[in-house]
Amino acid sequence: MKKKSASHSAFFNPRVLLGVLIVLAGVSLALFAANPFGRGSTARAARNQQQTQPDAPAIDPSVLPPGFDCSQVYNLGIDRQENFAAGLIMIACGYSEGGSPSPGSRVFGYGGLSQWMQKLLPEPLFIGGADVDVVLPDGVFPKVTQSESMEWCHGNTCVVNYNDSRTAGACYSGISSSTDGGATWTASQQLCTGHGTNFGDPIVV
């Protein structure tokens, strides 16, 4: 009968080694997700620096809501909002720099991957070409809002579905079509006839 050598460690057992590797991978992923020293701390440090920065630009009261208190920006969550009003408040209160885009990386930033991909796209493009009014005739004030569109083209046939307030009250849908590649458009109210209401987001299927 052959005896096992005492010099063999548990780490040379494949099952133990695999288990240790799985545990280490799990711990690494958990630490990466929690990462107190990474991406979150930089934003917090910048926020703390801006809060204590004595030479912050003067507040422009013309863009602030009446009676707005700039010290409440973080308490109200305005720093986490992505709308124009919140952006103006952050700039006016001196917490953000306005007028210049944030620099991107060399690959994904300005002049990098996006311009390279743009060169790969065929010309002419249906989306991104010259602006064309697809809603003619226009509505009469106050029912003049057309917004939130979805476009589709196949060959020379193009369809645009959009929110349209011309029949507001019962239907907020409009559709326009083109058979000449988007050069001319015909607006239709077919989405608002034959049923009750239509308040959904516009899609083309």
Image (cartoon, rainbow, N blue to C red):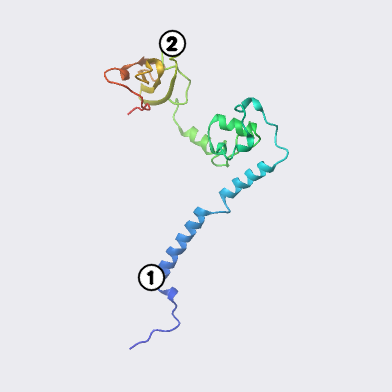
> For this rendering, which residue is in front, 20 or 37?
37
Q: Residue furthest bottom?
A: 1
- Measured in 3D between alpha carbons, the distance from the residue under mark 2 to the one under mark 1, in whole angstroms, is 76 Å
Measuring from the top left, give residue 152's x and y in whole percent.
37, 26
Do we see residue 100 in this rendering?
A: no
Measuring from the top left, give residue 76's x and y in whole percent.
56, 37
Position of residue 198 in the picture relative to residue 55 (left or right): left
Do we see residue 151 in this rendering?
A: yes
Q: Secondary structure at mark 1?
A: helix
Q: Residue at x 65, y 27 (%)?
A: 61
Measuring from the top left, give residue 17's x and y in whole percent.
42, 69
Q: Quadrant of residue 199?
A: top left
The amino acid at mark 2 is Val
Q: Does label 2 or label 1 sit earlier along the sequence?
A: 1
Q: Residues within 10 Å of mark 2 (few under 14, many from 20)?
A: few
Q: Residue at x 57, y 51 (%)?
A: 38
Residue 25: image tag = none
Q: Residue furthest left?
A: 194
Which quadrant holds the C terminus? top left
Q: Residues within 10 Å of mark 1 (few under 14, many from 20)?
A: few
Position of residue 37 in the picture relative to residue 29 (left or right): right
Measuring from the top left, give residue 125's x and y in whole percent.
44, 26
> For this rendering, which residue is in front, 150 or 163?
163
Q: Quadrant of residue 90?
A: top right
